[in-house]
Image (cartoon, coloured by chain):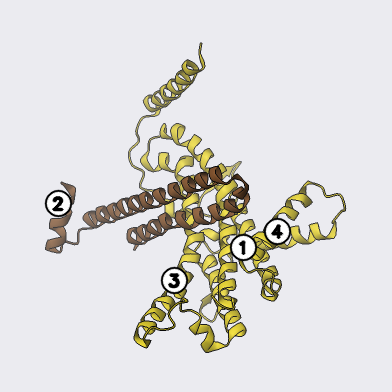
Amino acid sequence: MSTKAKVWLGIGGYFAFFILMLLIFGNEGKNDEFKPQNEFKLEPWLNIKIGGIDFSINRAVFYLALASALTIATMVWIARRMQQKPNRVQMAVELAYDLTRNNITGGNIGETKVAIRWFPFLAALFFFIWFSNVIGYLPLPTNTQETVDVFGIGVPTFAIYAATANISFPLVLTLVVWVTYNAEGIRAKGFLPYLKSWLPPGLEDMNPIGKGFIFVIEAISHFARLISLSVRLFANILAGHLLLLFMGGGLAVLLGIAALGALTFPMAFFFFVLELGLIATLQAFIFATLTAIYIGGATAESH
Amino acid sequence: MDLLIIAQAASKGVTDTGITDAGKSIALGVGAGLGSIGAGIGIGIIFGKEIESVARQPEMKDELQSIRWLGFALTEAVAFYTFIFGLIAFFL
């Protein structure tokens, strides 16, 4: 039998399996009880309220604390046991350090004083976002919504949730970055010259009204960075988790067609590999790179 | 046909929850779908141009690689903006 025939036979067998499952289990009708958005709902585990502001401990706070603890622990642990002849973990961390040092900071700010001052910030940003993205794809039993009875004891179900899939976490990071690069620009140039440097070059002989108009557009673009930077990270991770949720069985439960799970589960595996291997690292890289570009652009001497 | 019913209901100011839900679903589906088309074309252009440039100058490969990922992520994010605005339309 040729390879082509084997492939077609495999595909045919797979669809025959799907149709068989469809005939056995059938259609149970649309399930209205299952709400996919509840997967991202934050249930307070520990109610803390100080002056009307909610400081409750919930899943997102747990993941955030876990990510920061992992970041600090890994880096300190590697730094403590540095060897002349590096083992695999040290090689990997050195590779990541090299990426943040030369590629993100050096490539976008250059070898200046500003780069030396802000390299720790950019590297910390990269590693922190990377860790919080990656632990988002480890199924931890943190779901308070659904429980499974094992010998009469309610065990929380395994859920994949990332702190970055919640808008508030990327938004706070973005606010820190935004304030940072503006403050660094003002420190490097002074307040009014910094605002003047928002104007693109080549407008020296333009009338003031046109300049003012372009300044307003540039100011809007600077404020839009707040939205674009935070929503990029948040939406990427949220969309990845939604895809995994729906492909990994959510769609079958929602539509009440159990056989659909046989079709969507391989896709869930594919998306899991894609998200963990590419998107998690890429988004951390993009966030740090754009921060470096913003800082570099704010402090650049002339255009 | 469904769209016609929704248009008629909208012109009469009908606030039936079924029709509003249908409109929200259409907004999410069509919006995110159209957004994905644009981002898909953009990502195709980025990777196509990168292959072209590496074929012309293979020694530039390492430099182009980081620029490619930057462009890919920036373009891909556009699809997610429409997705998020679709979700906002769906849930609010």
Tell which tag, 3 or 2, sits nearer the viewer: 3
Determine the CA span between mark 4 and mark 2.
55 Å
Q: Please indicate, yes or no, whether residue A65 appears anywhere in the rendered image.
A: no
| Chain of the residue that carries numbered disc 3 in the rendered image | A
Q: Secondary structure at mark 4?
A: helix
Q: Secondary structure at mark 2?
A: helix
Above or below, A100 relative to A266: below
The residue that disc 4 covers is A70
Amino acid identity at mark 2: Leu
According to the rendering, which colour does chain A have? Answer: yellow
- Which dot marks residue A64? 1
Determine the CA span between mark 1 and mark 2.
48 Å
Callout 4 touching callout 2 (CB < 8 Å)? no
Question: Which residue appears at 51% of the width and 11% of the height?
Answer: A1
Determine the CA span between mark 1 and mark 3.
26 Å
Amino acid identity at mark 3: Ala
Determine the CA span between mark 1 and mark 4.
10 Å
Determine the CA span between mark 3 and mark 2.
37 Å
Determine the CA span between mark 4 and mark 3.
32 Å
As drawn, the chain in brown is B
- Which dot marks residue B4? 2
The residue that disc 3 covers is A224
Q: Secondary structure at mark 3?
A: helix
| Chain of the residue that carries numbered disc 1 in the rendered image | A
Residue A236 lies left or right of residue A121; in this view the side is: left
